[in-house]
Amino acid sequence: MEKLSMEIVNPHAAGIDVGSRFHMVAVSQSEQGVKTFGVYTEDHQSMIGWLKDHQVNSIAMESTGSYWQTLFSALQVAGFEVILVNGRHTKNIKGRKTDVQDCMWIQKLHSLGLLSGSFLPDHFTDQLRTYYNHRQHLIEQMSKYTNKLQKSFRLMNIRLDVVLNDITGKSGRAIIEAILNGQRDSIELANLVNGRVKKSKVEIAQSLRGNWRDDLLFEIKECLDLYDIYHSKLIACDEALNDILIVAEPHPNHIIQSQVKKTRSKHAPLFDIQKIAYSYYGTNLFEIPAISYNTILCLLTHISKKDFDKFPTVKHFTSWLRLAPDTKKTGGKVISSRTPKGKNITALALRQAANSIGNMKGHYLSHFFKRVAYKKGRSSAITATARKLAAIIYQMITRQQPYLPSDIDALEQKQKKQKIKNLKSQFKKLNLDKNEILDILTSGSLSPNF
């Protein structure tokens, strides 16, 4: 009986199952080729020496969490070719699952060339991610204390959250500080609001009449102090992020031909993110409607211009973002086309931008958003529109071209022609004559979504 064999692509390969307390390393398919190492720096050096003694030059490692990062860097510095493998690609192991079998299975798959590495940013982008993630953590903490402030006022029936959109804004801070200083007159407190507040001062004064409690006032003071601390830390984080971006700016003398002015959100970075992004990417992403300062900051700190070259096509890029459907076919039929689940931070930022497009009227993607939302719901529309935005960004950066907006009037005319074509097709199926069609049109019974 003829035996089938697979070609060994990586003859000097090793597999590492990374753990929180120890690492299992396999250099062969025998238990003698498996060894356990600790997680300390000395253990890393011992592992590197052991791998070199076995003439290993290519390593595949599988891990969850952040336990792999220090070992990955140490192996790269030592000269090994290292890839990080998705756990879903190595989990189908036959028999009882153990750490020894895991690392041997990883080594076997890597030797046969059946594993592909995950996308990993360069060292500089990894540093930017650290600043961005810490920045997001500070914003989350500020939001928590804002919610506690609102709850404390609500328990006293002081409804600042009804009359003010942001109680930590200019008007809200003025009122809160006056309350903490002992002011209880609702009319005097209402006079502290800014003139741009839409609610009348009479209604604001009504919202400031409640039951004053010392315990809740103490909680409000503490929450406000902690909010200010986190806000000062956010400013310091932005300054540090700005410094590292300016120092490593690849083309500091690039001048943007057209500055795009956009409304800054509350926690948007105060430094010139538009100029820095143009210097890094070579194109002005701010020209894309609905793309905010926070969206560009997220993109800038997670994907460099060189990283875009790692994706051969826009389909690879949107698939990595988990914005493209994972179509599965069998027997010539599509059995599943769901979008894979994931926690890609860049995709989340694009989804937020797509959600804002759904609330806009003048954006050329609004028609696309509403059409998908009508058929499949708002959630699917957000994903589909986010994929459109990702494709636009990919084309602008890889091709180094400016944003080319679509002609909204031409798009509406095209959609109008398509609707007329659909109506004619429906009338033909129903075998309607001219009088019946005229009767439908004059009676107003034709649905706008027909």
Image (spheres, rainbow, N blue to C red):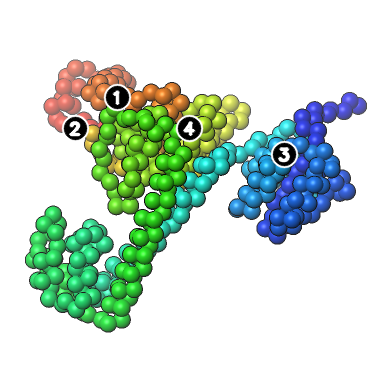
Whole-number angstrom distance, CA of label 4 to CA of label 1: 25 Å
| 77 relative to 307, above or below | below
User: Where does label 1 land, which residue?
Assistant: 406
User: Which label belongs to residue 80?
Assistant: 3
Task: Give, as a three-letter code, the residue at label 3.
Answer: Phe
Disc 1 to disc 3, C-alpha distance: 48 Å
Amino acid type, residue under disc 4 in the picture:
Lys
* Earlier-in-chain disc, 4 versus 1: 4
Q: Which mark is residue 234?
A: none
**Mark 2 to mark 4: distance in Å?**
54 Å
Q: Residue at x 70, y 37 (%)?
A: 81
> Which residue carries the number 4 mark?
305
Q: Nearer the viewer, mark 2 or mark 4?
A: 4
**Camera-side residue of 409 and 14:** 14
> Which of label 4 and label 1 is nearer to you?
4
* Camera-side mark, 1 or 3: 3
Q: Residue at x 27, y 34 (%)?
A: 260
Quarter holding residue 212: bottom left
Where residue 19 appears, as percent x and y from the top left, is: 69, 55
Classed neighbour count for the residue bearing mark 3: other residues with Cα under 10 Å, few (<14), some (14–19), many (≥20): some
Disc with the residue nearer the chain's start (1 vs 3): 3
Side of 446 relative to 310 (left or right): left
Give the residue pinned by disc 2: 445
Residue drawn at (58%, 26%), measured in percent from left and top? 332
Vertical relation: 224 (above or below) 127: below
